[in-house]
Structure formats: C-alpha cells, structure tokens
Image (spheres, grey):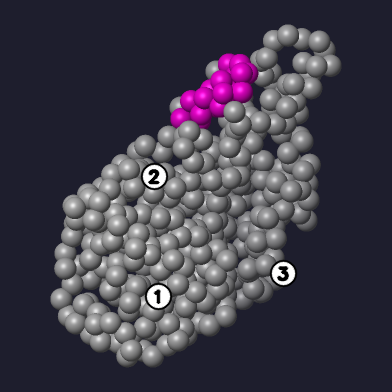
C-alpha cells in the first residue's frame, strides 16, 4: 500500500476532514460554497470525497476540473459534458425522482433563446455572447435537478480567462451569480489551487462571489496529524512513536496532508537506507531519519519550484518584485518580520509611502491566501518550515 503524496486522495487514501465535510453538507442545504485556503491542503481530495458521498446518497454529482480551460464557452461545455442529459435522466428514473439532501424549488419564468428550447428561468438579461445559448440550455437542464456541481481549479481557470477576455469573463461571472441567486435545486462548490479572493480583489471583482458560503480549509490539528502519520506508517509496516510524530510535526511546522505524507515517506526511505546499511531488523523511524528527510527535500527543487514559478508566471510588476523581496527577507529571519520592517525594505522599490502601503497590502493578501506566508498580529512568517528552508537556500537575497 502506498502513501498518497501529491495526487488526489480517493477511497481509502482519503483521511479525515470529517468536521469540514459535515459543515459543507450543512451549508449546501441552502447555499452555494467556495472552498478557500492555500495549496497543498487537499481541497481537490475533499471535492472527490464529496462526490463519493453525494453519489452514494442519490445525488447527481461530478467534479469538473477546469484547470486546462481559458474561456467561458469551453467552461460551460465542460460542465455540460460532466452532467449529460442521459446520465441525469437515468439516475432520476432509477430513484423514482426522489433525490436526497438539497432544498428543491422550481424556477418561474419561461424564455426562448434563439434556435433553442424554451427555458424556464428567473434570468437576468444575458447579453449576446458566443456562449449565450449554451449557457441558457445548461441552466435550464440543471436548475431543477438536485445536482452537486463541484468545480475544481476554478480560480486557475478564472485567472487565465480574465487575461484572455476580461469582458466576456466578467459576463460569465455575472451569469453564474445570477444563476446561484435563483431558487434552484442544484448547488455549486468552487475551489482552486490559487486564492480566489486575492484574484478577485486584483481585478476589482470582490463582490462577485459574496453570495456564497466560504469554507476556509486549514491544516490539520496536531492530534489529527498524529493520527494520519500513525495510519500511513502502519500501512507501510513502520513504527513511528508519538515522540517521533511530534518531532516530525515540529520540523515541518505547517501540518498539511501533503507535507505530512511527504515527510513521512522520505523519513521511511531514510530509515530503510539506515536499516539496510546497518543490518538492523527493526522498522522504526528515528530522529536522524526525519532530519535526513528534511535535508533531502529542501535540496530537491522539484518539490518546491512551482511555488516560485507560479509567482513569476502570474504576478505582474511591480507585484512580483514586491513578493520576491518580501519572501526573501522573511526567509532569512528566524522570527519573521513586522509590517514596518517590510515597509522599510520595500522603500527601494517605491518611495511614495501611500502607494507602497497599498501595494504591500495587495501582495500580502496574495501570499497569505496562497499559503506562502502567515500574517500574525505582530509578525509575518512562513507557516511551512520546509518552504522557508527551500526559499532561504534558493531565492533569498
């Protein structure tokens, strides 16, 4: 049996998040949802587990990954492909029209899009666009169905689409909002590996999703982290004592499923080498194995390079220079930096204090929402000690 690292955790590979799932199901009774939180917290895995639970309980559900899409028309067609008419009709017939869990209301107004079927909707006027009829038909098909539409990597799609066609993408956002605000039976959950709030703020679209319930997915508690380490160590046939569990958690700082499992897997690899070279028969993880794993990981660019390349790819100037300067100065500090210290550091990039403060706020929102930094009352620091050590080694200036 393997330890899930990097890939979406399905079935027996998925661990816990019971509290978050209960909260999601409760919210879905009367709301659409945005799952927010930094990358590497398992948002995609939560969507997959919600799909499994929905289908098992008689809901029409699917995860629609829109990471590779960069325009509204293909976004709509991707949802249509995930929820084909035949699949919806077949499940409703099988269940006798009795679907579970979401409040069901019927829309009221009938429209007739050009060349299409009559559409029963309460629909805000939708301008002529290349995707107008596809949007109306999709909305007609799904509005009265107890469907759970799980949109993964929505923020990634949105960023690319806004860069390519801002006007058309804003129309798409407005249409989605109008759809969500009607008394419909279907529900949306939006998630993504980059922060939706900071993205919307950058494009001055912050109110576009304020009708949704927001679930902030955080790291595991220390108790849940211990249980997860024990679970996957047992699966591999290795012993990790509570003392070593605590040491490993303290070593990485940020208790995300990805980094916990990555450190565990690397520690097992180091322990196996020690065991083979020393001729030991025991299979127990020791301090030296964890320290060795930490050193191996920060020396391996492939585990962290995307944190740098994402900023370089997506942040325009002067935000990119601000972000790199901030991360570099915090990476070499043992206790993080204060906002005042960062303002002084950035003086070389912007001498106007008002503009500098505004840009600092904008960059910190991005870096916090995407998981680079944690902003406390007094200090700003890296929550992940692995990422901090990597950044200090490769990008600090």
Magenta-drawn segment: 224-241
Residue 366 image offset from top left, x and y in percent: 55, 61
Q: If you read the primary sequence from the N terminus, does the residue marked by circle 3 or circle 2 appear first?
A: 2
In the image: residue 162, left or right of residue 270: left
Q: Residue at x 31, y 73 (%)?
A: 139
Q: Which residue is label 3 attached to? A: 348
Chief secondary structure of the magenta span?
helix
User: Above or below — where is 81 with respect to 331?
Assistant: below
State the residue lying farthest toward the right.
Answer: 277
Q: Residue at x 18, y 60 (%)?
A: 104
Which numbered dot is residue 173? 1
Residue 78 image offset from top left, x and y in percent: 46, 68
Residue 357 image offset from top left, x and y in percent: 55, 68
Q: Is residue 226 magenta?
A: yes
Distance from Cα at disc 2 to Cα at disc 1: 28 Å
Distance from Cα at disc 3 to Cα at disc 1: 38 Å
- Mark 2 residue element: helix
- 10 Å neighbourhood of mark 1: few (<14), some, or many (≥20)? some
Q: Which residue is label 2 attached to? A: 52
Q: Residue at x 69, y 65 (%)?
A: 312
Residue 42 image offset from top left, x and y in percent: 50, 45
């Amino acid at each position: 049996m393997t330890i899930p690292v990097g890939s979406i955790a399905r079935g027996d590979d998925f661990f816990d998040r019971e509290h978050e799932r209960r909260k999601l199901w409760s919210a879905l009774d009367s709301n659409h949802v945005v799952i927010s939180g930094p990358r590497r917290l398992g948002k995609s895995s939560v969507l997959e587990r919600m799909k499994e639970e929905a289908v098992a309980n008689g809901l029409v559900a699917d995860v629609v990954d829109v990471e590779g899409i960069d325009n509204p028309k293909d976004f709509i067609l991707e949802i249509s492909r995930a929820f084909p008419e035949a699949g919806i009709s077949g499940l409703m017939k099988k269940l006798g029209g009795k679907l579970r869990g979401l409040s069901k209301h019927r829309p009221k107004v009938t429209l007739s899009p050009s060349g299409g079927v009559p559409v029963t909707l309460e629909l805000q006027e939708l301008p002529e666009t290349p995707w107008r009829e596809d949007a109306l038909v999709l909305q007609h098909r799904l509005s009265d169905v107890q469907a759970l539409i799980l949109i993964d990597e929505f923020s990634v799609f949105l960023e690319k689409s806004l860069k390519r066609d801002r006007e058309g993408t804003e129309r798409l956002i407005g249409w989605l909002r109008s759809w969500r605000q009607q008394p419909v039976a279907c529900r949306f959950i939006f998630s993504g590996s980059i922060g939706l709030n900071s993205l919307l703020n950058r494009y001055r679209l912050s109110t576009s999703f304020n009708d949704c319930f927001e679930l902030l997915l955080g790291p595991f508690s220390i108790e849940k982290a211990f249980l997860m380490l024990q679970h996957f160590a047992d699966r591999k046939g290795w012993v990790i004592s509570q003392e070593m569990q605590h040491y490993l958690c303290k070593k990485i700082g940020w208790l995300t499923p990805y980094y916990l499992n990555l450190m565990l897997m690397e520690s097992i690899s180091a322990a196996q080498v020690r065991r083979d070279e020393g001729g030991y028969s025991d299979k127990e993880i020791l301090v030296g194995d964890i320290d060795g794993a930490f050193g191996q990981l920060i020396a391996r660019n492939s585990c962290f390079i995307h944190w740098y390349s994402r900023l370089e790819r997506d942040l325009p100037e002067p935000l990119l220079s601000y972000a790199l300067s901030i991360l570099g100065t915090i990476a070499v500090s043992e206790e993080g930096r204060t906002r005042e210290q960062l303002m002084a550091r950035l003086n070389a990039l912007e001498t106007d204090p008002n503009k500098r403060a505004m840009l600092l706020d904008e960059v910190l929102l991005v870096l916090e929402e995407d998981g680079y930094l944690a902003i406390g009352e007094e200090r700003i620091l890296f929550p992940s000690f692995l990422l901090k050590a990597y950044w200090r080694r490769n990008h600090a200036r």
